[in-house]
Image (cartoon, grey):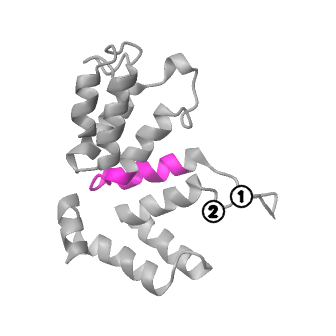
Amino acid sequence: PMAAQYVKQLNTDVQDFSDLLDCMLFQGFSGRMGRHTLMALAHQGNPFACFEIGELYYHGYIQESIYGEAAGKTRNYEKAYEWYSKAAEKHPHAGALWTMAYMIISNRYPHVEETEIDYGKAVEFLVIAAQKNSPAALNTIGQLWEEGHYPCENFRDSRECYPADLGKAKKYYE
């Protein structure tokens, strides 16, 4: 029952969630077969599988080979962001949206000069995730208001931000 409520709240395809659970429960993610099945689901557009592939790249569990040799456990933020983006395409995955916003805000990807961080793009992702009842997104929006990083209406010029507003921050924290 809780899984069905979760899927309904996400406004997504129950079969996508079911396919991911089957993969996790019966094959796991640690072995080659589990990752192969997970990757196959992701290539079919399953947003949950795309998110999980993004997580594996983000945390360095998928290793790229260099000249036939295995690379060390290296985080690949570019690949992670690519897979999170795929998870957000079909039925926006709140976790993927929040993580992409976090990567932008923390300047992990795309890595830019601090004055060029696109808070507007991050807020676009956060607003959609917040509409999907993501506590992390609501908390992050609160932090942006608290720190004076919430962009003005013109999201395209994210260098212009509203001043800190603890009242608005509190509203999102609550």
Quadrant where the N terminus lies? Answer: bottom left
Q: Which range is magenta?
A: 80-95
Instruction: State the image coordinates of residue 22 (x, y, percent, origin top left).
Output: 38, 82
Name the residue tied to disc 1: 73
Question: Of residues 47 and 74, which is closer to you in this image?
Answer: 74
In percent of width and height, residue 90 lies at: 29, 55
Q: What is the CA distance from the residue labelled 2 to the residue labelled 1?
A: 6 Å
Tell me the quadrant of the picture where the C terminus can be found.
top left
Mark 2–mark 1 CB contact (< 8 Å): yes
Find residue 174 and name its label.
none
Q: Could you tell me which residue is drawn at 43 percent across and 83 percent down? A: 25
Label 1 sits on a secondary structure element that is loop
Q: Mark 2: which amino acid?
A: Tyr
Which amino acid, by three-letter code, is at mark 1?
A: Lys
Left or right, 114 with respect to 145, comes to right
Q: Position of residue 44 (x, y in %)?
A: 39, 67
The residue carrying pointer 2 sits among few (fewer than 14), some (14 to 19) or many (20 or more) residues within 10 Å by Cα, namely some
Quadrant of the image occupied by residue 119:
top left
Secondary structure at numbered mark 2: loop
**Within the image, what quadrant is residue 47 found in?**
bottom left
The residue carrying mark 2 is 61
Q: Residue at x 47, y 32 (%)?
A: 105
- Observer able to see residue 45: no
Name which residue lies at 22% across and 50% down.
132
* Quarter holding residue 154: top left
Predominant secondary structure, magenta span: helix
User: Going from the N terminus, do you reach mark 2 or mark 1 first?
Assistant: 2
